[in-house]
Image (cartoon, rainbow, N blue to C red):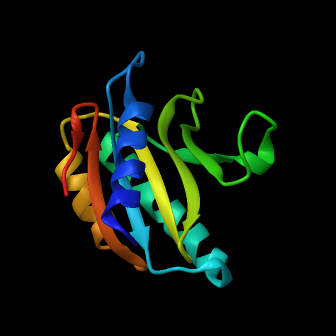
Amino acid sequence: MSETVNEDLYRDTVELLKPGDIELAGAVVHTTYDSSEESMLHQLTLDAGEAVAERAGKGDTYVYSGNDSDEFGVNQHQGLTLEDDEFVWECQQLVREGTFDLVLYWEATGDQDAVLADVRNLDGVDRVVAITEAGFEL
């Protein structure tokens, strides 16, 4: 995939993070999965969300998905706390040039490097690009 196309995605993701009520951190997760591997992508999405939730320390979470509501797109998922439906993470799944990319973001906790390391170690991850309100790191 051309770097220009990727950089446009990264810039768009930076814009998603700002301005908001809370400071957000995020990542674009390039996967090895193509459209025939949606079940594996689903598991990767859950695992990435769990990595964020564990680092956020907000307790047990559940996934609220696009197919659960007309407020979200089908490939949009949100991790919320069980206790009070508090936001923990959100993810959009995109098919780009034959493979899936995840746009993942969460409340910034100062532990972004640990979250990114956890996500990089998940099955199916090709590359992870860190995103903050200030920009992205290639």
Assign the C terminus to one quadrant of the image: bottom left
Q: Where does the image place residue 17, in percent across and percent down from the top left?
A: 39, 31
Q: Residue at x 58, y 43 (%)?
A: 78
Residue drawn 48% across the image and 59% down it: 102
Vertical relation: 17 (above or below) 34: above
Residue extending furthest toward the top: 21
Which residue sits at x=51%, y=32%? 87
Residue 16: image location, x then y, percent? 44, 33
Left or right of 17 in this view: 132:
left
Residue located at (66% from left, 54% from top): 75
The image quadrant that residue 83 belongs to is top right
Taking depth in this image into account, of 7 and 86 the one nearest to the observer is: 7
Residue 89 as seen in the image, left or right of residue 26: right
Q: Quadrant of residue 59?
A: top left
Rendered position, 12 above or below 28:
above
Nearer the observer, 57 or 69:
69
Residue 72 drawn above or below residue 39: above
Q: Position of residue 107 (x, y in %)?
A: 36, 33
Residue in the foreground of this view, choosing between 74 and 116: 74
Quadrant of the image occupied by residue 51: bottom left
40 displayed left or right of 14: right
Q: Residue furthest bottom?
A: 36
Given residues 123 and 86, the one toward you in this image is 123
Viewport quadrant of the N terminus: bottom left
What is the tally of numbered marks visible in this picture? 0
Q: Is residue 37 above or below residue 128?
A: below
Instruction: Residue 115 in the image: state x and y as whole percent.
Output: 27, 53
